[in-house]
């Protein structure tokens, strides 16, 4: 039968691959691992591990290689970084994500000594391109690295400074380092600025010191735990800096009075270990990676300016006795307790958002690296507003506006909303291209986080259909900012703003918020999924599928893809996503035949789509090849391994294209395509029998993986019709007419064979050529195949490659009736990097019926 032609074809491919590899012991672009896996799945029917398993193994095996690669690249970029030969980098840690990207955190070194605080994360793309680095690289220090002080002297100095004898957990050591001394100050041009914000600060490098880093570790010391770090000048013995490590300074203020959250516990930091006594609003258990420019970790809350002064510096919130707040709205000049109330609310909200991200979606802080965040509160200038500064991981919250009865801008949902901007900035960068709809969505996704954190903390209206707005303190609701008197409804009645591109981001984002609300709570024909499920789908879309310029249509696609990843194609969850967006007039409502279909404009990735009967899955694997699975077995694939960010798109022009990566589009980045670009709004169908078919918008098949039954053949391409795309299923062209094929593509010809007659097909003369290397003779690595199959059963004849040795393929109709036969011409050249596979290779076939 027709379908059985396929494995046979693959066996040929395998045979040729092995033959080829033994003949040409050169490096070829085919992943040997991939070839091995496919051979086992086809011939031995072994279980091919699906999706992540073997890809993970591969990434692991490659990881040390990739780290080495990054180190080499960073070293070869020394000049760019303004570094001398003595400067180097050393791996601190590294991780590979599910897209095959490797993120390596590096320590800068000078003459083999650590440059203190100079760490950088280098990102290596799946294709091993050093995409970018984040963090700071300092200029080469140029200092004498011979210390006058011995390490044991440095330890003695530290112990002397500590002023008490302790029982060490581990023996103190002193490590020689380069210590850059700098000044963190308000940038000159902002000196007279009254409403200072974090982005107005700058770091001025002053000098580099040769120093010892001494750590005194006595956390279990009976008379009080000690975990101190010292920086000691390696020449003079001066104590340059000292601080206590995270946990021993951790304190809990159990009965802190907030304005919006009642009496709560907040984490504070006791700094009595440093000689002065008191507590600061620094959460030593959350935010354990240092913010840029800071020497102590922990999420912090700062006042926009000291109470009752005209100074422009910001101060961290402190209390001498660790009792915080009075529970009242801030009034300027009303005293420290009132001011602390806003600080308590903010600290509580930051911790709640942090825990929500960790517990619900296993995210480490906003940047997923645990970097500490900072809130600057009670800013008179910001008024009834709040702003997020992504580069410094700082939120700035207004003191409200008493003339309009707007209260402190520190309610739980508002703080979580601002932190949402931090998640977006670190992840999808949604909205950063300035596109109107992406900016609207940027606000909407923050509203979703704000609302969900509020539900996480307070519980409340989880039940489907609930739209009530409970009072401020007792339960969560679907309104943002109600407590500060600047409300914004998630359960609104808006629809997509259409061409009204002037809509402000917060307003233009409301339809998305409504779609999320409907997804969680149902209504308007949408089946409620509950907050948990809705958020899981949303989070996956937000972090893996949204990008800087995602618009409403893209957001819908992302949410559908995420729902399929998590719950399967055609699932109730996917249907609800369709319907939630349908209600806000973004895309259609769900229809039952939507399964097994990749619509025009939609993308396919490793999550894949299933045929409606659930038997076949088409997906782009993380390794870059697109494969069709029957259960666990790959039954068809594109030979495009080694492209880790690959994805396929059913383009609106009708072409179904597999691209190398999300970052690259255009002809150069195409790995494989169906050549059906002349038919706008075409769609791809994964049929219940495992066939893949590209249909026109009116339902005519344009391309198929295996030949379609004759009654499905389109009546197009009638001989001389030059507008017909060469990749279509077309009736035979006249002998000698030249067609062009790209690598791994097939052409189909339908020919009727009368009873008792034989169809012969052969390549004709010199037309079997490659445009590479002159274009007149067959290029040596061209490989072609002709196969003939019948519709009504009987044998499938498959020829060997028609070049070297060349063969005529024939098929005899032994039945008593005329049958339709399909001639498939297939090209599977092996390519080298020097050859441009995008150049079509030409051929012509002669058909004879005898
Ligand atoms: Zn916002």
Image: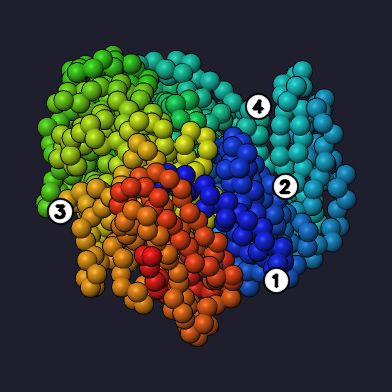
| Sequence-first disc among 1 and 4 | 1
Residue 709 visible at all: yes
As helix, strand or loop, the secondary structure at mark 3 comes to: loop
Residue 661 visible at all: no
Where is residue 745? Give x, y as percent. Answer: 43, 61
Question: Do the CB atoms of the residues marked 1 and 2 lie less than 8 Å apart?
Answer: no
Using the image as rendered, state which of residue 324 and residue 29 is in the foreground: 29
Where is residue 134? Give x, y as percent. Answer: 54, 55
| Sequence-first disc among 1 and 3 | 1
Tell me the distance, in whole angstroms, between the alpha carbons under discs 3 and 4. Answer: 53 Å
Q: Which residue is mark 2?
A: 231
**Would residue 92 be found to the left or right of residue 263 on screen?**
right
Q: Which mark, residue 501? A: 3
Tell me the distance, in whole angstroms, between the alpha carbons under discs 1 and 3. Answer: 51 Å
Q: Which residue is mark 1?
A: 84
As helix, strand or loop, the secondary structure at mark 4 comes to: helix
**Residue at point 28%, 17% (across, down):** 462
Tell me the distance, in whole angstroms, between the alpha carbons under discs 2 and 4. Answer: 19 Å
Looking at the image, is mark 1 or mark 2 nearer the viewer?
1
| Sequence-first disc among 3 and 4 | 4
Q: Which residue is mark 4?
A: 248
Where is residue 362? Give x, y as percent. Answer: 50, 31
Looking at the image, is mark 3 or mark 4 nearer the viewer?
3
As helix, strand or loop, the secondary structure at mark 1 comes to: loop
């Amino acid at each position: 039968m027709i379908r059985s032609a396929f494995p046979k074809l693959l066996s040929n491919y395998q045979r040729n691959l092995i033959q080829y590899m033994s003949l040409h012991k050169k490096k070829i672009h085919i992943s040997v691992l991939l070839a091995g896996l496919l051979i086992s799945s086809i011939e031995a029917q072994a279980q091919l591990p699906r999706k992540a398993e073997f890809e993970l193994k591969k990434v692991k095996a490659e990881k040390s290689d990739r780290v080495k690669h990054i180190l080499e690249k960073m070293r070869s970029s020394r000049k760019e970084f303004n570094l001398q030969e003595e400067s180097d980098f050393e791996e601190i840690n590294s991780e590979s994500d599910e897209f095959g990207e490797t993120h390596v955190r590096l320590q800068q070194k000078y003459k083999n000594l650590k440059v203190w605080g100079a760490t950088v994360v280098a990102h290596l793309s799946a294709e091993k391109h050093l995409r970018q680095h984040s963090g700071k690289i300092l200029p080469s220090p140029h200092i004498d690295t011979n210390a006058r002080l011995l390490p044991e002297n440095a330890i003695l100095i530290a112990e002397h400074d500590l002023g008490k004898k302790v029982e060490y957990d581990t023996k103190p050591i002193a490590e020689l380092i380069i210590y850059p001394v700098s000044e963190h100050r308000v940038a000159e041009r902002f000196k007279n600025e009254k409403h200072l914000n974090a982005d107005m600060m700058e770091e001025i490098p002053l000098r580099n010191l040769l120093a010892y880093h001494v750590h005194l570790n006595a956390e279990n010391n009976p008379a009080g735990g000690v975990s101190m770090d010292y920086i000691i000048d390696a020449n003079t013995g001066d104590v340059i800096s000292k601080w206590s490590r995270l946990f021993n300074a951790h304190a809990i203020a159990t009965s802190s009075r907030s304005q919006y959250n009642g009496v709560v516990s907040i984490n504070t930091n006791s700094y009595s270990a440093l000689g002065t006594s008191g507590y600061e609003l620094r959460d030593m258990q959350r935010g354990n990676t240092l913010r840029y420019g800071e020497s102590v970790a922990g999420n912090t809350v700062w006042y926009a300016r000291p109470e009752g002064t005209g100074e422009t510096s910001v101060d961290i919130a402190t209390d001498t006795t660790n009792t915080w707040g009075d529970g009242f709205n801030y009034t300027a000049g009303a005293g420290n307790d009132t001011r602390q109330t806003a600080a308590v609310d903010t600290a509580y909200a930051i911790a709640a958002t942090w825990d929500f991200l960790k517990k619900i979606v296993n995210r480490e802080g906003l940047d997923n690296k645990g970097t500490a965040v900072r809130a600057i509160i009670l800013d008179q200038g910001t008024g009834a507003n709040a702003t997020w500064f992504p580069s410094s991981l700082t939120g700035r919250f207004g003191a409200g506006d008493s003339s309009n009865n707007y209260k402190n801008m520190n309610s739980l949902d508002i703080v979580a909303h601002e932190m949402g901007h931090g998640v977006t900035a670190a992840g999808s960068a949604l909205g950063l291209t300035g596109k109107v709809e992406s900016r609207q969505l940027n606000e909407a996704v923050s509203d979703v986080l704000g609302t969900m954190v509020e539900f996480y903390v307070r519980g409340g209206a989880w039940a489907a259909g609930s739209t009530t707005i409970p009072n401020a303190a007792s339960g969560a609701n679907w309104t943002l900012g109600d407590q500060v008197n600047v409300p914004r409804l998630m359960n609104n009645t808006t629809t997509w703003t259409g061409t009204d591109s002037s809509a402000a981001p917060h307003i233009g984002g409301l339809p998305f918020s409504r779609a999320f609300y409907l997804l969680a709570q149902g209504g308007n024909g949408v089946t409620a999924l509950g907050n948990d499920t809705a958020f899981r789908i949303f989070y996956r879309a937000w972090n893996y599928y949204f990008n800087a310029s995602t618009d409403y249509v893209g957001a819908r696609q992302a949410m559908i893809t995420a729902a399929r990843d998590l719950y399967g194609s055609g699932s109730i969850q996917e249907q609800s996503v369709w319907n939630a967006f349908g209600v806000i007039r973004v895309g259609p409502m769900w229809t039952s035949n939507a399964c097994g279909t990749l619509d025009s404009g939609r993308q396919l990735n490793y999550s894949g789509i299933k045929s409606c009967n659930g038997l076949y899955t088409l997906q782009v694997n993380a390794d870059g090849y697109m494969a069709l699975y029957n259960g666990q077995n790959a039954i068809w694939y594109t030979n495009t391994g080694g492209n880790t960010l690959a994805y396929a798109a059913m383009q609106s022009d009708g072409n179904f294209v597999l691209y190398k990566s999300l970052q690259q589009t255009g002809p150069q980045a195409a790995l494989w395509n169906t050549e059906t670009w002349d038919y706008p709004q075409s769609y791809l169908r994964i049929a219940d029998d495992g066939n893949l078919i590209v249909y026109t918008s009116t339902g005519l098949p344009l391309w198929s993986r295996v030949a379609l039954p004759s009654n499905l053949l389109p009546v197009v391409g009638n001989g001389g019709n030059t507008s017909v795309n060469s990749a279509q299923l077309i009736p035979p062209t006249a002998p000698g007419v030249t067609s062009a094929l790209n690598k791994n593509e097939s052409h189909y010809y339908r020919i009727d064979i009368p009873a008792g007659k034989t169809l012969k097909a052969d390549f004709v003369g010199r037309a079997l050529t490659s445009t590479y290397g002159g274009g007149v003779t067959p290029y040596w690595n061209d490989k072609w195949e002709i196969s003939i199959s019948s519709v009504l059963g009987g044998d499938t004849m498959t020829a060997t490659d028609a070049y070297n040795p060349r063969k005529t393929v024939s098929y005899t109709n032994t039945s008593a009736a005329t049958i339709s036969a399909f001639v498939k011409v297939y090209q599977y050249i092996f390519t080298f990097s020097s050859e441009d596979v995008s150049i079509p290779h030409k051929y012509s076939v002669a058909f004879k019926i005898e």
